[in-house]
């Protein structure tokens, strides 16, 4: 099938679902033909972006209508597993938003169900496609930093946004902040570290955000800050520094990788990559390059969602008779591992002890 004919259905038309619709509207070869959401205002808002698309209140009716070749699943986190139960086995190509699921058991069940699925299955870990991060990953894989021994990720940002029904205020719905928000960063760690994550230690809590909110008599329980250390099985380690009450900041994300040959760092939204080589550069004297996005639509994630859809579309176009299993860059296994690292971090915060990935997986 030519990608010129790829028809998309968007399941879940809240903020992120609508973001996907606008990205796809800028992408040659993509056409949104169907929408599904049980919340009428969300469905109407999405329909205003793509008036010709069919509308459904139930995603199963969208699947059965035969109007799509691919679906984007952008429903609330706690519904991903159930929606994927209905999608997998249909032959539709699938891009499911992060996190894959809210717990490892559901991730495992989805992976098992996908073994016989005759279509591409892709997890929406779009941060790996942010232009500065993509350049950093490319440099690391080219050996610029040498043997990687440490990585550091910092996200200093604004609090969680408002969502329909306020579902994202409670860890039972999201998987917890280290799953919901930070699966992106654990995925980035795994993209640059040569080993496999072995142990997680985290310290974090709810310090500022949402403490004065109440929903049905319940106060939100999502943490807003944490330090997370991940030990890898080759002796390397990575650090995540998260603060969600740091609205007044210059760069929301900073990603640094240190190897025995030097350091590479990427800054977003500054769009800068810096490379310092040991024996060549020194403190304050490094190579600095502007790496702006080349995406046709920048959107909420600095063009990364658009680039992700480009890669997804290219992967669909290149599928052979047996090629579908190996074609997903952001695989279900990568999605499961990023969730497991978040689950381990949440468990570490609760217990005050380091948590081995083997005990989570």
Image (spheres, grey):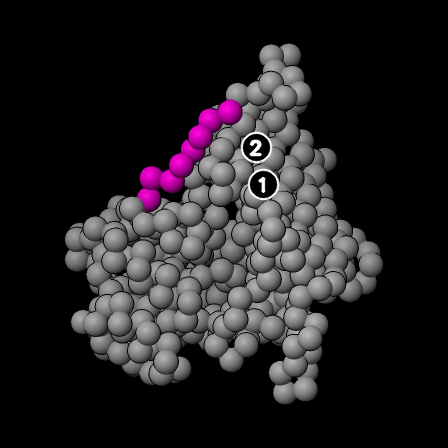
In the figure, residue 213 lies in which quadrant?
bottom right
Gap in angstroms between the C-alphas marked 1 and 2: 7 Å
- Residue furthest bottom as drawn: 216
Q: How many marks?
A: 2
Magenta stretch: dominant secondary structure? loop
300 to the left or right of 160:
left
Q: Which residue is mark 1?
A: 254
Above/below status of 97 relative to 57: above
Is 328 magenta? The answer is no
Residue 188 on image: x %, y %:
55, 44
Above/below status of 338 relative to 235: below
Q: Is residue 205 visible?
A: yes
Residue 326 on image: x %, y %:
39, 47
Which quarter shows the C terminus?
A: bottom right
Callout 2 secondary element: strand
Q: Are marks 1 and 2 in contact (CB under 8 Å)?
A: yes
Q: Which residue is mark 2?
A: 265
Q: Residue at x 25, y 52 (%)?
A: 27
323 and 213: which one is in front?
213
Residue 3 on image: x %, y %:
20, 52
């Amino acid at each position: 099938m030519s990608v010129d004919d790829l028809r998309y259905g968007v399941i879940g038309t809240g903020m992120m679902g609508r973001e996907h619709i606008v990205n796809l509207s800028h992408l040659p070869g993509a056409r949104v033909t169907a929408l599904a959401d049980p919340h009428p205002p969300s469905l109407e808002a999405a329909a205003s972006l793509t008036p010709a698309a069919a509308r459904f209140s139930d995603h199963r009716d969208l699947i059965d209508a035969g109007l799509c070749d691919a679906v984007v699943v952008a429903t609330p986190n706690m519904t991903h597993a159930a929606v994927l139960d209905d999608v997998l086995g249909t032959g539709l190509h699938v891009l499911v938003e992060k996190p894959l699921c809210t717990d490892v058991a559901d991730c495992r069940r989805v992976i098992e169900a996908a073994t016989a699925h005759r279509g591409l299955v892709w997890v929406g870990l779009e941060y790996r496609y942010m232009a500065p991060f993509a350049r950093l990953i490319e440099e690391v894989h080219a050996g610029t930093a040498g043997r990687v021994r440490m990585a550091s990720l910092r996200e200093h940002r604004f609090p969680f946004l408002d969502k329909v029904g306020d579902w994202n205020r409670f860890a039972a719905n999201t998987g917890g902040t280290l799953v919901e928000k930070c699966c992106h960063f654990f995925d980035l760690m795994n993209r640059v570290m040569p080993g496999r994550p072995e142990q997680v230690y985290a310290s974090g809590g709810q310090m500022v955000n949402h403490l004065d909110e109440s929903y049905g008599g319940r106060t939100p329980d999502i943490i807003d800050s944490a330090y997370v250390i991940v030990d890898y099985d080759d002796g390397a380690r990575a650090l995540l520094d998260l603060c969600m009450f740091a609205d007044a900041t210059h760069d929301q994300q900073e990603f640094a990788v240190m190897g025995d040959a030097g350091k590479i760092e990427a800054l977003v939204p500054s769009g800068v990559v810096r490379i310092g080589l040991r024996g060549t550069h020194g403190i304050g004297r490094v190579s600095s390059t502007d790496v702006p996005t080349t995406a046709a639509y920048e959107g909420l994630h600095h063009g990364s969602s658009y680039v992700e859809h480009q890669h997804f579309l290219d992967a669909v176009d290149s599928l052979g008779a047996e090629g579908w299993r190996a074609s997903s860059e952001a695989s279900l296994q990568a999605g499961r591992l990023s969730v497991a690292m978040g689950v381990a971090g949440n468990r570490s915060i609760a217990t005050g002890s380091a948590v081995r990935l083997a005990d989570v997986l």
